[in-house]
């Protein structure tokens, strides 16, 4: 195992959470995956399992790995505040990627590669770390029952009374050179299937993933930033996706939102951008009782309002989001516009707030810039 310190890499090496497949492969084995960028996820996935509509999800089994698929992640974001009202964000992500299809091989020959990202954000600072592991040696894995996801000492694990339908309660821990956190996550509602009953389309050409979320977490615990501990509480969101070919070859990146709306409604929304300038918008509106409906009505839009320049990249960090059929017209603002994840495959990700027809908090991820 080696831990990578933050570095600024060229745009040609920009991979992200959902473009992890090519990236982890490059670090583990070297070779053409590094040069493929997002194209690594747009190539055909011969030999791997395919995503098709109508899957019957089963828990706790589907909380665990799906090694027959090429790409997978367990991803948590948390919008937090302390007793003084100061706000923070925390992120924890574990990625799995299969280097080749086929039955699992034991030990160092195992074809699974794991990568972890963790971050803490405040209005004035953004701290992050990443780590890598090979499968088959116990350094990283996910066990569905009792639930535990880990890479090195970073963990997302079920606590006493864990309910597989709610994915709760959980303990979330991670630490880097100058930050750390330990949070408890509780939820009063079952998890939510995204897309069409868990089948999440990424293009009109068949690319898709299996996708579910737990957007109803209540979080409480402690952050440590530059040696200073702070007790925090707030809301958190878990995303789970797996696929073998989630992008088309001409898709260059996405802009992804997870929003906590008034009255405990939730919105997941993302725009996938294409090389020819066209885009596809997908999402789900989630009611307070956990019912999930795809965003299908026309006239929906997300448009940049403000640009932040980081290391030569121009990033749209403030947005206008409009869903006429839902009566939603909001403008988003980042807690910290410089929330750049300068990992080996860099991207922007951080907490946001929004106002307009609805007011609330959430997270934003920007890839491919």
Image (cartoon, helix red, strand yellow):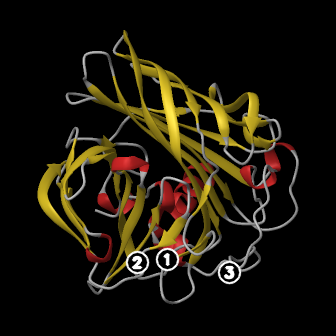
Q: Badges 2 and 1: C-beta atoms under 8 Å apart?
A: yes
Asked whether the residues under the numbered discs 2 and 3 touch, taking CB atoms below 8 Å apart as contact, a structural biologist would say no
Q: Quadrant of the C terminus?
A: bottom left
Query: Which of marks 3 and 2 precedes in the sequence?
Result: 3
Q: How many marks?
A: 3
Judge the density around disc 1: few (<14), some (14-19), many (≥20) Cα neighbours within 10 Å.
many
Report x, y in % for residue 245.
Answer: 60, 74
Q: Which residue is mark 3?
A: 53
Nearer to the camera, 90 or 330? 330
Taking the view exactly as shown, the residue that stands out farthest to the bottom is 205
Image vertical order of residue 56 relative to residue 232, above or below: below
Where disc 1 sits, the SS reads loop
Residue at the spot 52% in from the left edge and 44% down from the top edge: 216
| Position in image of residue 227 (x %, y %) | 37, 10
Instruction: Name the one closer to the observer, 58 or 336.
Output: 58
Label 2: which secondary element: strand
Q: CA distance from mark 2 to mark 1?
A: 9 Å
Residue 321, position in %: x, y?
Answer: 24, 65
Judging by the rendered image, the residue that carries numbered circle 1 is 202
Judging depth in this view, the residue of 156 and 320 nearest the camera is: 320
Task: Count residues near mark 2 (Cα–Cα under 10 Å), then give few for <14, some for 14-19, many for 20+.
Answer: many
From the viewer's perspective, is 72 left or right of 147? left
Looking at the image, which residue is at 72% across and 80% down?
46
Above or below, 352 relative to 36: above
Tag in front: 1 or 3: 3
């Amino acid at each position: 195992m080696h831990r990578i310190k933050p570095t600024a890499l060229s745009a040609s090496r920009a991979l992200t959470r959902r473009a992890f497949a090519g990236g982890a492969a490059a670090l583990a084995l070297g070779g053409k995956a590094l040069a493929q960028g997002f194209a690594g996820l747009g190539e055909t996935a011969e030999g791997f399992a395919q995503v098709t509509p109508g899957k019957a999800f089963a828990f706790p089994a589907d909380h665990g790995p799906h090694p027959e698929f090429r790409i997978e992640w367990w991803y948590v974001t948390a919008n937090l505040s302390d007793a003084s009202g100061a706000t923070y964000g925390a992120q924890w992500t574990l990625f799995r990627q299969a280097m080749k299809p086929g039955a699992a091989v034991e030990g160092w020959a195992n074809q699974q590669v794991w990568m972890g990202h963790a971050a803490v954000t405040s209005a004035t600072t953004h701290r992050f770390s990443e780590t890598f592991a090979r499968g088959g040696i116990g350094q990283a894995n996910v066990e569905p029952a009792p639930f535990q996801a880990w890479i090195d000492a970073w963990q997302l694990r079920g606590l006493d009374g864990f309910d597989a339908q709610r994915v709760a309660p959980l303990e979330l821990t991670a630490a880097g050179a100058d930050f750390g956190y330990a949070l408890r996550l509780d939820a009063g509602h079952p998890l939510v299937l995204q897309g069409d009953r868990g089948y999440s389309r990424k293009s009109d050409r068949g690319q898709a993933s299996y996708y579910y979320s737990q957007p109803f977490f209540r979080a409480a615990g402690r952050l440590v930033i530059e040696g200073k501990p702070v007790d925090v509480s707030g809301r958190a969101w878990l995303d789970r996706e797996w696929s073998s070919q989630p992008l088309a070859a001409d898709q260059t990146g996405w802009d992804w939102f997870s929003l906590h709306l008034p009255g405990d409604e939730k919105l997941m929304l993302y725009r996938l951008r294409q090389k020819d300038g066209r885009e596809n918008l997908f999402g789900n509106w989630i009611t307070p009782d956990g019912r999930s409906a795809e965003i299908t009505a026309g006239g929906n839009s997300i448009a940049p309002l403000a640009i932040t320049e980081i290391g030569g990249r121009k990033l749209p960090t403030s947005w206008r989001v409009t869903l006429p059929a839902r009566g939603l017209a909001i403008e988003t603002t980042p807690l910290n516009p410089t929330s750049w994840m300068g990992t080996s495959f860099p991207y922007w990700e951080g907490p946001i707030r929004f106002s307009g027809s609805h007011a609330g908090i959430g997270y934003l991820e920007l890839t491919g810039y």
